[in-house]
Amino acid sequence: MNVAVLGAGSWGTTLAVHLANKGESVRLWEVSQELAQALIRQGENVKFLPSIRIPESISISSSLDEVIGETEVIVIAVPSHVMREVVKKVAGIRLGVSVISVVKGIEDGSLMRMSEVIREELPESKICVLSGPSHAEEVSRGIPTTVVVSSRDSGMAGNVQKLFMTENFRVYTNPDLVGVELGGALKNIIAIAAGISDGLGFGDNTKAALLTRGLAEITRLGVAMGANAGTFSGLSGMGDLITTCASPYSRNRKLGELVARGRAADKALSEVGQVAEGFRTTGCAHKLAGIHKVDVPITEQVHAVLFNGKDARSAASDLMLRAPRAELEEDFLCG
């Protein structure tokens, strides 16, 4: 199959290598001509994925026309804030091409999920989402990983499952597109909270509480937005949440840790060195929770720390001192 991967960050490069190693015909798009030439010359992504060789069979270019000209499937692995810009360019070249989004974010302003952005710009395309606990650093080294794909088109979901499946990369399907996307995006907020916990020197008890109560509020907001509650117990919910909150590879956890240690949010983002989707997602989720009238206390405190300069320790204290309540809320159970 002819596959185009748009975005040569760590995840885009990893998926391009993964598919090429399976024998697919892969073209990789890097927006910067200078960086594209460096990838070709060095044979690896030194900046984002060092020590992983890029197969010579992968065609690398900064020309979008060249990369997607004859492709059957496009995998989009760009930051959420440039998704619409990239998809608009794709629409000017190819219509009706199948699109797989691996982007875990929400669009600023419109508050749309990534598949909604794609559908708005490419209404004739079949769209699928791939999500789940899948750090590029591990997938690229062949460490066993399990993910989930979702699409309104069950046939496409099945085809994408087959496209990516290997002995070290297991793929499940889930028809709940809303839940799969929201799980992948919202867990980044809880990962920032987990990083704040680490930065403040808290322990396993605190981390466990954040993951558990974080999953509860992700589920509440997700169900209010049309998702199936059960999806958040799966790979794009609980699975991705565990990985992102605990891993040293997690950009969002690192962001929270740096902020808790006194860095201003903009300085912390710069120090992380790669896009931490949770920063923008926190702002979006805060607005969505207000629109849907959903209680999201962890998100509220992370938002206050990142956007209002609230002291991280005060935010933790305010979470602990909230009014007593039952663990199993009626709206959560019914969702």
Image: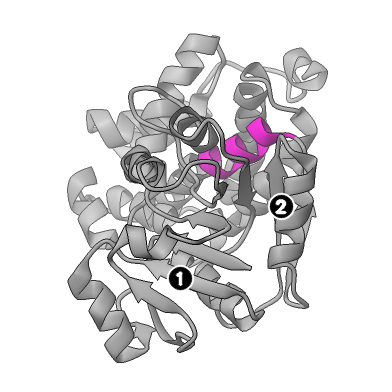
Main secondary structure found in the magenta portion: helix
Q: Percent x, y for residue 32?
A: 22, 65
Segment tinted magenta in the rendering: 176-186
Q: Residue at x 77, y 37 (%)?
A: 175
Can residue 112 be seen here?
A: yes
36 left or right of 276 in image: left
Between the C-alphas of marks 2 and 1, the distance is: 23 Å
| Residue indicated by mark 2 | 148
| Residue indicated by mark 1 | 27
48 left or right of 243 in image: left
Q: Is residue 181 magenta?
A: yes
The amino acid type of the residue labelled 1 equals Arg
For label 1, count other residues whose C-alpha is less than 10 Å away and answer few (under 14), some (14-19) or many (20+). many
Can residue 310 be seen here?
A: no
The count of marks equals 2
2 vs 1, front mark: 1
Looking at the picture, does residue 318 appear above or below residue 135? Answer: above
Looking at the image, tell me whether mark 2 or mark 1 is earlier in sequence order: 1
For label 2, count other residues whose C-alpha is less than 10 Å away and answer few (under 14), some (14-19) or many (20+). many
